[in-house]
Amino acid sequence: MATSSRKKTVNRSETNGSAPKRKKVQRRSTAQAMAASQKEISVSEFFAKNRHLLGFDNPRKALLTTIKEAVDNSLDACEEAGILPEVWVHIEQAGPNRYKVGIQDNGPGILKKQIPLIFGKLLYGSKFHRLRQSRGQQGIGISAAGMYGVQTTGKPVKIISKVSVRKPAHYYEIQIDTKRNVPKILNGKGEGVDIPPGEKGAAYIKKHGIEWVDQPHGTRVTIELEAKFVRGRGSVDEYLQQTAIANPHISLHYLDPENYEYEYMRSTDVLPPEAKEIKPHPYGVEVGRLAQMIEESDTMSVAEFFRTRFSRITPGIAKKLCQGASTTMRTNIRKLDRTHADKIHQTIQTTKISPPTTDCICPIGEDLILKGLHHVVPGEFYAAATRPPSVYRGNPFQIEVGLAYGGAAATQNVTMDLLMELLEETDTRTVRQFLIHTFNGLGGDGADKIVKAATLKTRQNPRGLKPKEREKLFQAMKNVNVAEGQQMEVMRYANRVPLQFQQSGCAVTQTVLGTNWRGYGLSQSRGAMPKGPVTLMVHIASVWVPFTSESKEAIASYPEIQKEIRLGLQAVGRKLGMFLRRRLKVKQQSDRREIFMRYLKEVSGAVSEINGAPKDELYDQLLKVAKKVTADADMQIDDRGRRVEDDPTQLDLGENTLIVDPADHEAAINRVAVADELEADGEEEHEEYEEE
Amino acid sequence: MPQKRPSKIVRAPKKPVKLSPRDKKTMASLVGLADGVVKAAKGRRDPYVDIPSRTLSNVRYSARKRIIEMGNGKNRRQLFDLSQAKSYMRTMLVASGCKQLLDQGKTTSLRGLYYMLKHTIEKTKENTFDEQNECDTIIEDVEVLLTSIREELHLYAENRGAMVGNITLIDRGDTINCSRMGSGGYAIPSIVEPEVIELDRKKCDAKFILHVEKGTVWQRFNEDRFWEIHNCILTHGAGQPPRGVRRMLNRLHHELKLPVYCVLDNDPWGYYIYSVIKQGSINLAFESGRMAIPEAKYLGLRSIDYDRCDLAESVKIALTDTDRKRAKQIGKYPWFEKKPKWQTEIKRMLKNDFKLEVESLISKDISYVTEVYVPERLEAQDWLD
């Protein structure tokens, strides 16, 4: 304050040129008056005003964030309890720009007194204070979603939770008191309601219109909020699909606002191993945190403090740290002050301490990544790589990369008969919609290209196509290369949670861009995403994922993390490269024969025209030469000049790859019986989320 | 398929055309080519053909004959080579097309043959030929392969170039008096071989041939009846003279012993046209013996003419970078390299840094070129060789 006012005086005297008259300065306000308006800001108030920090920037994102937080919590709870997760997501339109979302799990349930705190108090949770791999971290998410709902619609958050079959279910309607950051319970006179088990309870649930899928245990949260439902990039659909990919052990039932039901059934019955909690590693502790730990500690010796509060501090290292802080091992930890903490921190940086144990991380695993990708993404080649665990800033982490290569699009693999069947059974209204919804991964642009090539009208009904038009559509599907200009799609995950926004700011994207994919058979312009029908998933598992912001959308670029990502990308890239090169070779060989065959008839015809030689005989002879010549060309010779028997169709790429025949890939074509997506508004598809 | 062509149906009742001795020779080499393919196929070998290469690296300048000659370099064209399979197929198609022409005793244009052979290959969407120039290069390959020139394969190009003068010749049995051709002149046919055009020493009064670059200049000379006044034959080749014009000049020169003088633009392109008339071209090196006129003289325009004829500043056309590059290239041709006069000529043009068209002389007077420029040069025997 003082400096700034002095500066002002100097400025004024300069501009006036003469010394100013000493005038009594009229203060606008006094320290006393100002003190009256200075008060504590509650966390909830802060986040209510800055809700964009938590991912509630706009109605579209709010809907996604709400579902995301609830689903993440459900999965965490189930896994912690050792239950194979089953999650129900239900979105229902409650009015213009207003949606009611309900998320239920089959988790262990929540104790009665905890319910209001978990859902009605910001920064209340079990995950913040421990170092353990989990989806949620801070304990803001679900309560913030509830707060957003209350703020935008005034409707309370409804929670029903059941611990076991015989125990009553607890039912709460909660509002968060933003001023004090405490929950306000609205029903049962501020005490909530207990719904007894059995028939009686069922009757009560029915009578009061409480949403609940009957389960022996589990939790359901229902939030009504101002939102906008979209499809495509950054949508709930995408989030749930990506979640299903990275979590092959979960079952997901999703009912969207247009009453379409999606079922992602689990492809494995094995739960991921339980994540272990670890103590912080000295390298990851900042000086302030260290001082705080010392302050908060119970009375104990310095040696014991180091041993019990940190990982990887051996008595030897403890001794060294004590020497650095000029104290002894037996001193009471409470006697140390900030300067000691400072010195200890400095000593830590110069002392070699072995990296933290990494068994606290549970990766998805290469097998399950392959399974998950294959289950959901259509393609013909899959590869996965799980890197060994590594450490950044004292936090262990592990990188996993999966890759799906689409090759020929699903549209190019259908037979005329199959197309007929699909056309018969579809319930879409236009050809464009038919294409988008039947063939996964085609997208609006690809469908447009095909419709244009088939010279059909955009609004034509797929069931009413005439045989000739069907033929045209079929030809167009065969001929249009929808993969042209297609870019690599990157799915990012942190602790199995898909990250959908801030793509460009994320360490994963930056590393993908910085990797040279040309060597692996993909085309890529400088500083751009590689082109081709490739889907990439990158998963970082860590006890503490370094997000760039509270809304958990992008991973910070630590060099150690980037290095691991790069190595992972290279591992799957090499396999893709081998696959593509080999495939190219097979294609070239068949192409070669085909080219010769094609011209032989012309040549023999022309020659017989000149000298009257029997045409067919000549053709047969030339055909034999062609076979001989191409066989010679196919033959490979090794370093010592011996023949190598090499069948390019047999390709050994080592483990963790999966090659499927794209023609009969289940994920490629949506039969109506399996899933029925319908685009109410075709234009919505084009709308994309702006990316920061 | 060739069999399905309507032309075949028309031909069927006709009795076979009697082949001329020349046609018999061509036919023999065509059949020889086809027999080679059959033989190789029987022996389970690739029925390749070796085509003399028509590139700069495979031509050399014969100082003795003073023409460009084709070297012995050959390119092997294989059927069972991915990059050559298609051209091999095309080569055989062109050969069979020529065979049909010979059989029927007909000639066709290059474009005609292209259409004759163009069809979609069975069971594919690929055409045998997509562009005419694809066919034209194959025709040239077949010419060198069979050592039969285009005319012998019954192919001709579009007529280009004209002539007028004191000569009477017989074209396909019709007597043509070239001194009575009006303003258009006699269009020089693409094929001027003795079977088509008969020349007679006795029916030629002209004493020399004046070849000009373009039709417009030729019109000037014809309108001024230059050929009548100076008793000569006046020809033009519409820029780079086509084979018909070159062969005609060659025949007139050799058979009627007429000297050839050229009036061309003073630019690298003009020099090159002169070089082609005199020594032959790289692409048609195998025909140089029948085309080139080593005694042809370069009458003008010269790079000194701007000063010599006192031309106006406005007629200058600045040299482009390509012009300068080309001029230096031409200066290094072996047939120009050892001629000091030519070297000074090219250097002078580069020093001038402008080029002159023959029409620039019109700025002096409309008929300056016909009445003053050319007669003076001829009188003074002032030319480049």
Image (cartoon, coloured by chain):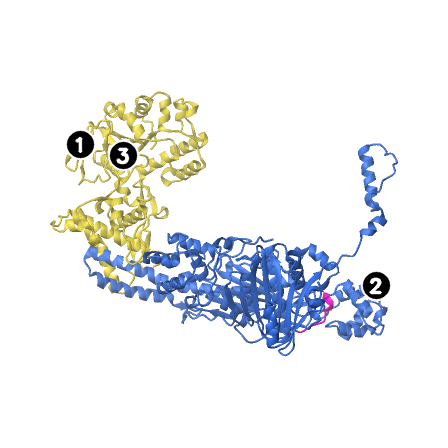
Chain colours: A blue, B yellow
- Highlighted range, magenta: A276-284
Q: Residue A312 is drawn in which quadrant?
A: bottom right
Residue ID for mark 2: A339
Answer yes or no: are tags 3 and 2 on the same subunit: no
Specify whether residue A48 is in view: yes
Question: Decide: marks 3, 2 in contact (CB < 8 A)?
Answer: no
Local SS, label 3: loop
Mark 3, Cα crowd under 10 Å, few <14 / some 14-19 / many 20+, is many
Check if residue A55 falls in the magenta segment.
no
Residue B143 place in picture, x, y as percent: 26, 48
Chain ID for label 1?
Answer: B
Tell me if residue A257 comes above or below residue A316 in the rendering: above
x 17%, y 46%: residue: B105
The amino acid type, in three-letter code, at marker 2 is Thr
Q: Main secondary structure of the magenta part?
A: loop
Residue ID for mark 1: B176
Q: Earlier in the sequence, mark 1 or mark 3?
A: 3
Tell me if residue A572 comes above or below residue A465 in the rendering: below
Residue A336 place in picture, x, y as percent: 84, 67
Local SS, label 2: helix
Residue ID for mark 3: B161
Lateral position of residue B381 relative to residue A88, left or right: left
Answer yes or no: are tags 2 and 1 on the same subunit: no
Instruction: Between residue A613 and residue A664, name the one nearer to us.
Output: A664
Tell me if residue B158 comes above or below residue A96 in the rendering: above
Residue B96 place in picture, x, y as percent: 23, 52
Check if residue A278 falls in the magenta segment.
yes
Residue A101 place in picture, x, y as percent: 59, 63
The quarter of the rendered structure image containing the N terminus of chain B is: bottom left
